Amino acid sequence: MRGVGSLTLYKGGAQAWGLRSPNIFDTMRGTMMRALRLGISKEEKVANAMGKLLSDFSLDLEAVGKYLATTQPYVVYSRAVEVLEATHYNKTVAEYRQIGQYYGDTLF
C-alpha cells in the first residue's frame, strides 16, 4: 500500500479490497488514473437553495416581495432584481438554443 497525497493506492486496485474508489483502473495499460471530482460553485449552491425555497407552493410570494423590499437594504433588493433579470435572460437563451433558433447574438 502506498499513499499519494490524499489518495491511497492498493496493490491489485481498490476493487480487490472491496472498496469503491475515485480511481479508475485501466486494464489496457495496467495503470491507475485519478478521476477528478469537481464540486459545485457557491453560486450553484445559492441557486439550488433559492429554488428549494421558492418551490414551496404554500409560500406567499407577494408577501415575500413586500418583506424583501421593506426590511432589506436597497442593495439586497437591487441584487435580487439583477438575479431575476439574469434568470429571465438565460432562460430565454436556453429556449432559443433548444429549438435551434439562436445563432451567436442574432435571434431569428
Image (cartoon, helix red, strand yellow):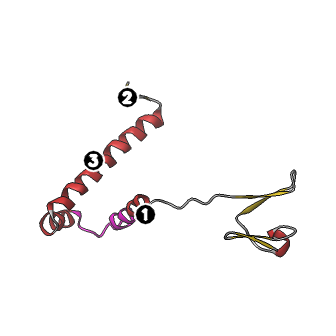
User: Within 10 angstroms of label 1, few (less than 14), some, or many (20 or more) residues?
Assistant: few
Amino acid type for the residue under numbered disc 3? Glu
The kind of secondary structure element at disc 3 is: helix
Amino acid type for the residue under numbered disc 1? Lys
- Residue underneath mark 3: 85
Q: Which numbered marker is on residue 105?
A: 2
Q: Position of residue 2 (x, y in %)?
A: 79, 72
Query: Label 2 vs label 1: CA separation?
Result: 29 Å
Q: Position of residue 9 (x, y in %)?
A: 78, 69
Residue name at image x 32 percent, y 66 percent: 57
Cβ–Cβ under 8 Å for marks 3 and 1: no
Residue name at image x 25 percent, y 57 percent: 80
Is 59 magenta? The answer is yes
- Left or right of 6? Residue 84 is left
| Towards the viewer: 61 or 2 | 2
Quarter assignment of residue 34: bottom right
Query: Label 3 vs label 2: CA separation?
Result: 18 Å
Q: Position of residue 93 (x, y in %)?
A: 39, 38
The kind of secondary structure element at disc 2 is: loop
Residue name at image x 27 percent, y 69 percent: 59
Quarter of the image for the N terminus: give it: bottom right
- Residue underneath mark 1: 45
Cβ–Cβ under 8 Å for marks 3 and 2: no
Amino acid type for the residue under numbered disc 2? Asp
Q: Give the magenta-colored segment's residue range.
A: 48-61
Q: Which numbered marker is on residue 19?
A: none
Q: Earlier in the sequence, mark 3 or mark 1?
A: 1
